[in-house]
């Protein structure tokens, strides 16, 4: 049997024999796209090798079940065993017709398909010499078929993999002046109207392995059309929309011996691609897409002579039915911003019934959503049942899906929706929700009108100003004061939930319709937020301001866990406030003030009026006016909610003292509100209540010390994302790029360790954290959203920030130099080590 076949002779339809990578390249070569010369080894060669090396039984054992130790031993055996003589001879003969330096890439039968890509799961070996080194590289590619991550990935995809499903591609290694990747749809937004190109100087592996931050270019492509028309449009021009240039100081290059080495360079703000090269590359991407019939992820390189080469191609669409009929999906993503610490039993007993009343749809849940509760606590952390959003999410043809809905999903599921062309919501679930809403007149639970919701908030503020002094009155009936406070919390949620919803909808809707160069400025809130006022007041406090006056205005501010009634408040620890103020005064970085921010928004509005005329201009101005109103509400409401919760906390402590004289204040946090009522009625013994409080306090302290549970749970299992070693991915919520030492903080009280310019790495940031933004050079958070409190403040301060970086506080080391890219949503972890020979492929 012939074991080696030239790439240009591989049948593009023989993916089960040669693997996805080989057949994709063969398809491009058949239409004269510039692919480097090479040859392919079919999967039969791998099986032939296993047979001759007496490893077939070990391979069959792994196929029956994942055994990590058995997989490790099999990988070692594959790398160590010699190739059969006939196979080795054909490889050496074929490679002698190529260059002196080669690239050896895995080409698995389950790789680069439309349903699963397995990107980065298998091996690529670069800078390989002909002979023994080439044979070793082939064996490494084969061994990666049994890698731990690949085995787990295949098992999770429920795909029945063949015994030895790994082909191999051997090609000339292209010496690259610049290189990178191109996506023929925008992978960050899901828009099929845009193409994205990322580029670095030197070899592309510095980019795909996450070691170098790349230039990022966005191209506008012809609209989606039937495939025959696409092939015509592929020859038309594409337009550059934006260019984000990275200052690159080192590159990965090939030396005279064919080895990959790091070389110091100073590219400055120089583009890695000219406009002409970028457009030529875009047209090649459209041709590749037309050939494959779906959007493509291409790896490319430009030679020193300026010639473009396509190195790899894979589909980036998602096929099949949406992932809806799965286990119940739980998340603490949004709850984790509001309860950074474990909840207090008292606080949760007051707030949880209110939230349950708003979010639970028991009839729909029992029919379609696994009949699980709307909320639960896992090791003291609130988790919300977000299974319903799997059924409500949709994607119009070629348009981005609703951004705020995607934030309820694990990263892998989010990427699935971004890659789809179109999908409707689950109309059965939608109809059930609407029916339940109508039957129970649920619209009365919310201030749902987008035009009157702000007025409802103004009325609530008037009520808070009138009622909070009565709740704080130490001579009043504490139990009645708490009950009244709980009703005000319910009234707050009625308004706040809808304000959040409209802020998110308007933010995405307006952002998609604004000119790209004005978008960032126009999406800012032109009104000074309470957070900025608080931070300015802190600096003023250090410069001689009166502490009593400061605490009178801002003492209700929480240090952390702002939605917990028993969160620590500034008024309870003036010394901590003074230390924070002094640290900000001594080391704050220069930030735009509110007047400069308002001026920036106004200038952008003037520029918008000159470009857009007539009805369209009026529509955009009205849309922006409403958006700015809701952005301001987003911050003002959190500020006022702190006032309300602090008043309720004080009333609860007074109520506890009435039923547990001398010890009530110490126990109040650890009991639940029904238990205080039972104590008042004599239905609960005081000694028993103290025992309950002590037991819960010890449990809370244990939870606070433990690693928090995963952000996402399916049933009771974690549903986290895979992380690379050098580049972490999340959601970019404030644009810009900054490099600096990381400072990993778990509470604002550790803020004195944050030196000016350090990158703040934190679990999440609520209002008590954001004063540290005056010292930070950038922000990385494990939890957040596009309109979370930290995101809004980071954009106001022009602070590069990335959120939803799973495991950031564990993966990023204290003092490690990192680069935060708030535009692309990436965090690079830097080290001084040279790259290894094998890199993710």
Image (cartoon, rainbow, N blue to C red):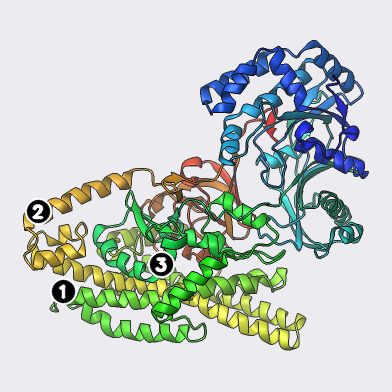
Label 1 element class: helix
- Give the residue displayed 39% in from the left and 72% down from the top: 639
Q: The C terminus is located in which quarter?
A: top right
Left or right, 483 with reference to 380: left
Comparing marks 1 and 2, which lies closer to the viewer? 2
In the rendered image, the vertical position of residue 236 relative to residue 262, given as above or below: below
**Image spot of residue 168 (x, y percent):** 77, 28
Label 3 element class: helix
Residue 105 or residue 242, whichever sits in front: 105
- Per the image, the residue denoted by label 1 is 478
Could you give the CA–CA distance between mark 1 and mark 2, rounded to whole angstroms?
22 Å
Label 2 element class: helix
Sequence-wise, which precedes: disc 1 or disc 2?
A: 1
Sequence-wise, which precedes: disc 3 or disc 2?
A: 3
As drawn, the label of residue 749 is none
In the rendered image, the vertical position of residue 799 relative to residue 603, given as above or below: above
Left or right, 352 with reference to 517: left
Q: The N terminus is located in which quarter?
A: top right
Comparing marks 3 and 1, which lies closer to the viewer? 3
Are the two marked residues, 3 and 1, in contact with CB atoms closer than 8 angstroms? no
Q: How crowded is mark 3: few (under 14 residues within 10 Å), some or many (20 or more)?
A: some
Residue 215 visible from this viewpoint = yes
In the rendered image, the vertical position of residue 779 relative to residue 162, given as above or below: below
- Per the image, the residue denoted by label 2 is 688
- Per the image, the residue denoted by label 3 is 363
């Amino acid at each position: 049997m012939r074991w080696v076949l030239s790439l240009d002779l591989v049948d593009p339809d023989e993916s089960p024999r040669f693997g996805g990578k080989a057949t994709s390249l063969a398809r491009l070569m058949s239409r004269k796209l510039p692919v480097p010369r090479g040859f392919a080894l079919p999967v039969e060669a791998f099986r032939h090798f296993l047979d001759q090396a007496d490893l077939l039984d070990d391979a069959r054992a792994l196929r029956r079940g994942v055994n990590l130790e058995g997989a490790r031993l099999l990988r070692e055996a594959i790398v160590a065993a010699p190739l059969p003589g006939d196979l080795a001879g054909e490889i050496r003969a074929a490679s002698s017709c190529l260059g002196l330096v080669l690239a050896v890439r895995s080409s698995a039968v389950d790789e680069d398909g439309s349903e699963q890509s397995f990107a980065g799961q298998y091996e690529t070996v670069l800078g390989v010499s002909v002979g023994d080194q080439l044979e070793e590289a082939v064996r490494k590619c084969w061994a990666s078929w049994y890698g731990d991550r690949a085995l787990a990935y295949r098992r999770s995809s429920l795909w029945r993999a063949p015994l030895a499903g790994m082909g191999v591609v051997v090609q000339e290694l292209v010496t690259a002046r610049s290189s990178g990747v191109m996506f023929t749809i925008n992978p960050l937004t899901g828009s099929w109207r845009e193409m994205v190109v990322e580029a670095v100087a030197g070899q592309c592996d510095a980019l795909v392995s996450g070691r170098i931050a790349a230039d990022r270019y966005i191209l506008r492509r012809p609209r989606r059309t039937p495939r025959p028309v696409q092939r015509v449009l592929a020859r038309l021009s594409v337009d550059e929309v934006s260019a984000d240039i990275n200052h690159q100081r080192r590159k990965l290059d090939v030396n005279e011996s064919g080895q990959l080495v790091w070389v110091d360079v100073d590219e400055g703000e120089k583009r890695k691609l000219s406009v002409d090269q970028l457009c030529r590359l875009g047209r090649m991407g459209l041709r590749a897409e037309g050939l494959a019939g779906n959007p493509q992820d291409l790896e490319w390189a430009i030679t020193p002579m300026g010639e473009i080469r396509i190195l790899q191609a894979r589909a980036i669409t998602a096929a099949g039915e949406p992932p809806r009929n799965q286990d119940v999906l739980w998340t603490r993503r949004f709850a984790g911003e509001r309860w950074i610490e474990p909840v207090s039993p008292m606080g949760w007993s007051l707030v949880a019934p209110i939230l349950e009343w708003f979010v639970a749809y028991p009839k729909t849940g029992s029919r379609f959503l696994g009949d699980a509760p709307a909320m639960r606590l896992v090791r003291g952390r609130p988790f919300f049942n977000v299974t319903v959003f799997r059924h409500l999410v949709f994607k119009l043809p070629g348009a981005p899906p609703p951004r705020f809905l995607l934030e309820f999903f694990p990263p892998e599921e989010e990427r699935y929706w971004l890659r789809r062309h179109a999908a409707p919501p689950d109309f059965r679930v939608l109809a059930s929700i609407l029916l339940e809403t109508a039957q129970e007149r649920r619209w009365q639970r919310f201030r749902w009108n987008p035009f009157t919701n702000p007025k409802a908030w103004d009325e609530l503020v008037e009520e808070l100003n009138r009622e909070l002094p009565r709740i704080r009155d130490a001579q009043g009936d504490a139990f009645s004061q708490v009950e009244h406070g709980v009703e005000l919390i319910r009234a707050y949620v009625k308004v706040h939930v809808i304000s959040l919803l409209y802020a998110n909808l308007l933010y995405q809707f307006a952002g998609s319709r604004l000119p790209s160069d004005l978008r960032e400025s126009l999406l800012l809130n032109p009104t000074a937020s309470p957070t900025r006022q608080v931070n300015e007041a802190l600096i003023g406090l250090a410069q001689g301001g009166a502490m009593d006056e400061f605490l009178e205005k801002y003492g209700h501010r929480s240090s952390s866990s702002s939605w917990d009634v028993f969160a620590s408040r500034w008024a309870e620890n003036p010394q901590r406030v003074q230390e924070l103020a002094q640290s900000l005064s001594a080391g704050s970085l220069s930030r735009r003030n509110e007047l400069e921010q308002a001026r920036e928004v106004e200038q952008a509005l003037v520029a918008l009026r000159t470009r857009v005329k007539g009805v369209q201009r009026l529509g955009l101005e009205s849309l922006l006016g409403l958006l700015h109103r809701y952005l301001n509400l987003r911050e003002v409401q959190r500020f006022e909610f702190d006032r309300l919760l602090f008043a309720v906390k004080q009333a609860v402590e007074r109520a506890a003292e009435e039923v547990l004289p001398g010890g009530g204040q110490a126990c109040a946090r650890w009991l639940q509100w029904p238990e205080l009522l039972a104590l008042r009625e004599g239905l609960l013994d005081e000694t028993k209540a103290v025992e309950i409080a002590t037991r819960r306090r010890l449990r809370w302290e244990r939870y606070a010390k433990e690693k928090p549970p995963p952000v996402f749970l399916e049933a009771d299992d974690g549903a986290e994302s895979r992380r690379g070693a050098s580049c972490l991915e999340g959601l970019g919520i404030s644009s810009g790029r900054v490099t600096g030492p990381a400072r990993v903080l778990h509470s604002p009280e550790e803020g004195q360790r944050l030196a000016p310019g350090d990158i703040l790495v934190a679990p999440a940031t609520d209002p008590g954290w954001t004063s540290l933004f005056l010292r930070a050079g950038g922000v990385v958070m494990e939890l957040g959203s596009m309109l979370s409190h930290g995101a809004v403040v980071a954009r106001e301060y022009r602070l590069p920030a990335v959120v939803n970086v799973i495991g950031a506080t564990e993966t990023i080391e204290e003092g490690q130099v990192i680069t935060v890219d708030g535009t692309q949503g990436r965090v690079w972890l830097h080290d001084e080590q040279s790259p290894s020979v094998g890199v993710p492929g």
